[in-house]
Image (tube, rainbow, N blue to C red):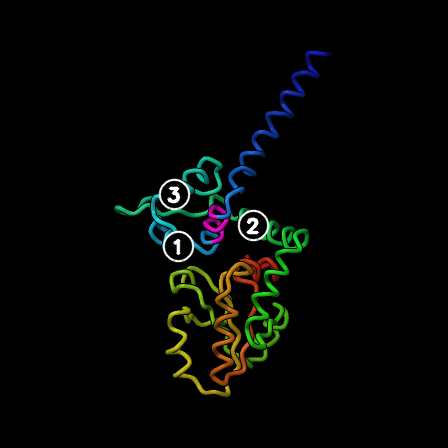
Amino acid sequence: MEEELNSAKIFKEDLYKQLARIGKCLSSDKRLEILNVLSNGSRTVEKIATCTDMNIANVSRHLQVLLDAKLVKFSKKGTYVIYSLADPEIIEFLSALWRISEKQLPDINRMKDDFLNNLDNVQTLTMDEVREKINNDSIILVDLRPKEEYEMDHIAGAISIPMEELEVFIREIPKNTEIIAYCRGPLCVYSALATQKLQSEGFTAFRMEEGLSEWQEHFQIH
């Protein structure tokens, strides 16, 4: 019996060591950012470097750690290596991590409040409020992500206006247009910045904090 108990103990310890591989991998803020970028679609190393403001060497090192933990995978297309999340459940895991962190770490809400307080009267709508406005055909829903992310998938009814094209969009639509902006989700500030810009130009504008993956999870869209 003692031998069986020792075997069970070793088995349990080995299991926890495997779980700890994921925990150690996620201990880097940069690797979390890379996972967040990949939750919006596959990317080359060069694209990830651009999105995260890291150099290619650092991105490659972080991707190797994520590969070792089986959180990402890659494929080759010509001379390009394209990375993606290893499993769609990782998106749900990242969403859960955000919710837990926001609930348990008061600094997160303080940081969000401080940032939004520096923007003039930026109003945030819930996902249910946004869908109601979409159903009533009373707004334009703007997807601020890069066009390739929009083309991979987007909220039904949204139009693609990447952040760098916002100025052109503002000049082309009538001022009585009501607009809701969304980006990559809670960790992206573009929706708040775009909303402030639209409001300063005389539009009625709102932001949605959540992104595509949160929208799909909330409304159980698969």
Q: Which mark is residue 74?
A: 3
Kindly identify which residue carries mark 2: 94
Q: Quadrant of the C terminus?
A: bottom right
Give the Cα separation between the discs numbered 2 and 1. Answer: 21 Å
Give the Cα separation between the discs numbered 1 and 3. Answer: 21 Å
Position of 217 with respect to 81 (left or right) is right
Q: Amino acid at mark 2?
A: Leu
Give the Cα separation between the discs numbered 3 and 2. Answer: 19 Å
Query: Would you say the residues marked 3 and 2 are in contact, meaning their CB atoms lie under 8 Å apart?
Result: no
Kindly identify which residue carries mark 1: 53
Q: Which mark is residue 23?
A: none
Sequence-wise, the earlier of marks 2 and 1 is 1
Q: Measuring from the top left, give residue 168's x and y in whole percent.
A: 37, 78
Sequence-wise, the earlier of marks 3 and 2 is 3
Rate crowding at label 1 as few (under 14), some (14 to 19) or many (20 or more) other CA atoms within 10 Å.
few
Q: Quadrant of residue 10?
A: top right
Q: Amino acid at mark 3?
A: Phe
Q: Is 119 included in the stretch rendered in magenta?
A: no
In the displayed orientation, state which residue is furthest to the left.
79
Q: Measuring from the top left, give residue 68's x and y in whole percent.
A: 45, 35
Rate crowding at label 2 as few (under 14), some (14 to 19) or many (20 or more) other CA atoms within 10 Å.
some
Is label 2 or label 1 in front? 1
Q: Quadrant of the N terminus?
A: top right
Query: Would you say the residues marked 2 and 1 are in contact, meaning their CB atoms lie under 8 Å apart?
Result: no
Q: Amino acid at mark 1?
A: Asp
State the residue at coordinates (40%, 63%): 146
Position of 170 with respect to 180 (left or right) is left
For the record, the magenta segment spans 30-36
State the residue at coordinates (34%, 47%): 56
Secondary structure beneath dot 1 equals loop
Secondary structure beneath dot 3 equals strand
